[in-house]
Structures are given as C-alpha cells and as structure tokens.
Amino acid sequence: MTTATATTKLSEVLTAAQLPALPQSAITLLQLSQDPNNGPAEFARPIEADPGLLGQVLKFVNSAYFGFSREIASVQQALTLVGVRAITNFALWSAVFSLVPNPKFGAFDLKGLWQDSLRRGLFARLLGRQLKLREAEDLFAGALLQDMAIPLLLKELPEQYAPLLARRVSENARLSSLEKEFFGWDHAEAAGVLARKWNLPEEFAGLMENHTQLDHLLAGGDSLRGRACVALASLLPSCNDPNWNEKDLFVAGYRQLVGSTDDLKSLLQDVDESAEKFAPLLKLPVPQVKLTNLV
C-alpha cells in the first residue's frame, strides 16, 4: 500500500515525541552493568541514593515471586541474593514504565500491553535458562520492553496508527506486518531507536528491534538464540485472549529452537505461576487466561 504516511520517517516521529530522559539512577546502574568487576557494593550506591527506587527494589525482592523465608532489609543483601542483573533490569523496566505515555485512545489499554509484556518477559527468561544462555536476565528485559514504542506511536500518530490496531484484531494480523505495509517500518524498529536514544546497552536494542524476525533469527544459529527467545515470546497470545491464533507458529519455532516440545507445557506452567506472583507487584492484573489452557 502506498500512502502519504510512507514518507513519515521513524526518526522524525520519535524526535517529535520529546520523551524525557531516563532517571539518573537507572542510567548509573546500566553503566555499572557494563563492567563485570562491579559487584553489589557498587550497585547499591545509586539505589540507596534514590529513595523511590530503594523502596521499589526492597518490595520487589520481598515479594511472593522470590518467596524468601525472611524479610530482606538491605539493598546489598538483595543484590547478592537476587543478582545485580535482575535488580538492574527491574530498575530499567520501572523507569521506562513511568516514562511511556498512556495515549488513552479508543480501546487501547496500556496496562493490558504491560501485562502481555510481563508474561513475554517471563517466558523469554525461563526459555533462556532452559537453553542455558548466560543472558537469560537480559532476555527478560528485552521481551518486557519489546512493545514499549506502541503507546508512543499511537500518541504521535493516532489517526494513522489506531486503524492498524483495529485491523490487527479484525484480520488476526501481526501488527508488525500492518506497520511495514503502511509506514515502511514497525514498532520493533522504533523500540530499537528508543533504546539507543536512551543509551541503553546495545544488546537490549538488538533484542527489541529484532523481535518480529523469528524466522531469520532461528536460521542464524547459536549466536542468535537469545534474540530468538525474545522473538518467540512475541507470539504468545494476549493475556485476556481465549484464542491463540499464532500457536502453530509458536510451537514450530519452539521445536526448532529447543529440539522438541516435550518440556513446553511444563515451561508454560512455570510462566503462568510466575505471572500470577509477579503481576500484583507491578500493579498489573493477573492474566485471566492461562497459557496451559491453550496448549
């Protein structure tokens, strides 16, 4: 389809959006994560200097998701027990969550988008662990943030973008395919641009901007397995959708990535249980439809 919007350059759209900068505490944590010699003591300093983040981190580690038998009252202890990557990625998600706008347009539901993203993040992390990938925590953050550009695009281009969201439902189409047809780019590419504007680590940008390219990633061999985990997670259904239109594509991708589907139901059960514990922590609804009921 040739339209006037095809000339709408992605960089111009995102520049016009004028997003605020990430909080300094999140930036510092990301900078620290680039040096493997930094440990809990170094990571604790920016968290302790940000009272809001400090409270969020302690609430996070004391949640039912981790299930520690005693209360964790120290940030250094939290970092030691949970891991600096998990805490850093939680801080990153919290920061992005607070910055992404809610366009409040039509039937669009920002909480629903974050709810879906959370389940996809949990799946990508668990699959990464199953495949023994060292970047499993980064896969969680990449999948969690893969759709962060959608509300921004809807806010900046409501007249062009809202019909695509409606067609996504009525035609059972992939949003990325509709975006490519209409704009010449998709929300995955937009997420990559945003990640770089915020100076996020390049691996995060790569995880997000490639999540609509599953076939390419699966064909890319072991070096792209992490990105393939995030792309596979994007095929999970919406948390409140009783139908899974892309289930066959998902199962085929999982089989190609893992080698068999023997452990798939068990993995999805773990995702369901994790989402039930994690969602309330982020003030999100617990998914109404369990993945294990759809396979």
Image (tube, rainbow, N blue to C red):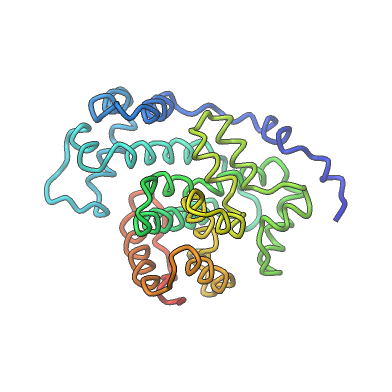
| Image: 108 above or below 149 | below
Near-viewer residue (96 or 224): 224
Q: Is residue 112 left or right of residue 270?
A: right
Q: Left or right? Give the position of 68 relative to 196.
A: left
Q: Is residue 147 left or right of residue 47?
A: right
Q: Residue at x 52, y 28 (%)?
A: 199
Question: Considering only vertical position in the picture, is 127 above or below 191?
Answer: below
Q: Residue at x 83, y 40 (%)?
A: 7
Residue 193 position within the rendered picture, expressed as x and y whole percent measured from the top left: 62, 36
Q: Does residue 17 sit above or below 145 in this rendering?
A: above
Q: Residue furthest left?
A: 70
Residue 266 percent location from the top left of the image: 34, 71
Considering the image in quadrants, where does the N terminus appear?
bottom right
Instruction: Indicate the quadrant where residue 177 lies.
Output: bottom right
The residue at 46%/57% (across/down) is 120
Residue 254 position, x and y percent, is 48, 66
Question: Which quarter of the image is occupied by the C terminus?
Answer: bottom left
239 displayed left or right of 178 = left
